[in-house]
Amino acid sequence: VIIFISDNGGSTPIYANNSPYRGSKYTLYEGGIRVPLIISYPKKYQKGSTSKNLISAMDVLPTLCKLTGIEIPKNIDGNNISEVLVGTNKTIEHDFLVWDNNAQTAVRKGKWKLRTASNRAKSNSDYEMVKMEYGDFLYDLETDPSETKNLKDDFPIVFNELKTIHKNWRTSINSQNN
């Protein structure tokens, strides 16, 4: 099994180009968090298949556990995506994903993405030479993968739903750490 994945988008100071996505490493724009995941296992997985499912690096561990016959640990956030890889179930994906580094947050659910950034993110954006917008933003990634149009005022229900997802996620993380 060969797995290729990055932990973040490319770094612009070393001339990475994350186009068409905005941002880079250390930012929660798509250019900082959307990365390729390539899994090759010619004896088992279909060659050349692709998926646009909302999956995460967290899914690698349970998938490898399933592949090797090891019990999947309890209380992990990852999904076993082996059925996606063999083509028997193309619906496995996360309902939503959350990122939070105390200066920036992002919630992705389907085509929608909430991104927030405070001025505390300035040092990272300066280092990465990325023009950062501060505040609350809602993007439709199907029509605007470069995150240029803030739709929070046009879709307040979606905006509030994603804010609630982040709040509930944060509450659950804090309760697990206490």
Image (tube, rainbow, N blue to C red):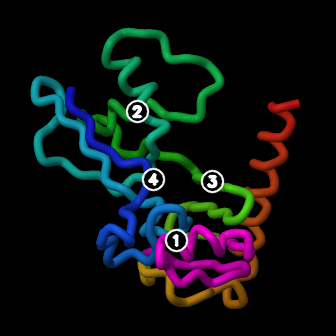
**Mark 1 residue element:** helix
**Position above or below: 50 against 40:** below
Q: Distance between the residues labelled 2 and 3?
A: 17 Å
**Amino acid type at mark 4:** Leu
Q: Mark 4 points at which residue?
A: 54
- Give the percent coordinates (x, y) of residue 178: 89, 30
Q: Mark 2 points at which residue?
A: 60
Considering the numbered disc 3 on the image, is that residue within a helix, a strand or a loop?
Answer: strand
Q: Is residue 61 magenta?
A: no
Q: Do the residues labelled 4 and 1 touch (CB within 8 Å)?
A: no
Using the image as rendered, state which of residue 158 and residue 141 is in the foreground: 141
User: Which label's residue is closer to the chain start, 4 or 2?
Assistant: 4
Could you say which quadrant of the image residue 8 lies in?
bottom left
Which residue does the numbered mark 1 point to in the structure image? 127
Write the residue at 58% across / 81% down: 132
- For marks 4 and 2, give the one nearer the viewer: 2
Which residue is tagged 3? 98
Query: Local crowd at mark 4 within 10 Å, few (<14), some, or many (≥20)?
Result: some
The local crowd at label 2, few if under 14, some if 14 to 19, many if 20 or more residues have their Cα within 10 Å, is some
